[in-house]
Image (cartoon, rainbow, N blue to C red):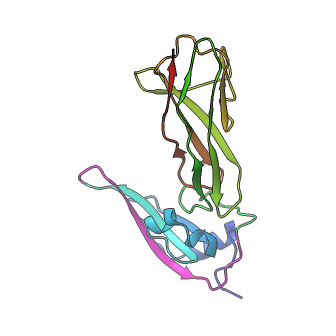
Amino acid sequence: MSLYGRTDSAANVTKAGRGIAASSQAKTIVFVDNQEAALAENKARGINAPGWWSYYTYTDGEGNVRHKAEHLVTIAGPDLNSNETQSDDTIAADYTIVIDSQPAAASVTAPAAAQFVVAASTTPAGGTLTFQWQEDQGSGFVNLADAGVYSGSTTSTLDISDSTGLDTYQYRVVISNTGASADVTSDAALLTVA
């Protein structure tokens, strides 16, 4: 039995955080299991082993966001966080989002319909993917809603019922996962309307 606890719980956060001195940085105590320790997002933050960590971010003199992670307690064989109680997924990701198939460009003759599809998954498998399609009319991407000619704006498939007036518009999708630390944005797909 570990003095610091093998699960991600409020009681164990208190135990693991004992002795951390106050500082100007807002430190967060996070629990990392084997699955989380193996993810590239966490390794990039300096979190590379299971156990309890003290973590914070700061902005350096050149405006770059930096990560500071200190391994407080190593836990051999930690329990997987199937029932996590801490809101640490912005720090220690459970999943990496992978785009398996990017949306493809489409060419149609007005007023024909058009469709854009993305395929995505998580590594390891799990969590719930959410989607938000965006459109760029030439002045930057904005979120779409299911209105007018658009449907499926929050699914993996965006349907456009009438392509009239949409020539050279671009479409992309932002994919999120409840346990992933970073959203993933697809490539932009061009709609050509003749």
Residue 26 place in picture, x, y as percent: 45, 58
Is residue 33 at least partly visible in the picture?
no
Q: Is residue 70 magenta?
A: yes
At 67% across and 39% down in the image, what residue appears? 156
Name of the residue lying farthest toward the left: 61
At 66% across and 51% down in the image, what residue appears? 178
Q: Quadrant of the N terminus?
A: bottom right
Left or right, 19 with respect to 84, comes to: left
At 67% across and 86% down in the image, what residue appears? 2
Residue 19 place in picture, x, y as percent: 50, 77
Q: Is residue 45 magenta?
A: no
Q: Residue 45's quadrant in the figure?
A: bottom left
For this rendering, which residue is in front, 13 or 96?
Answer: 96
Is residue 51 at least partly visible in the picture?
yes
Q: Which residues are magenta?
A: 61-80
Name of the residue lying farthest toward the right: 83
Is 173 above or below relative to 89? above
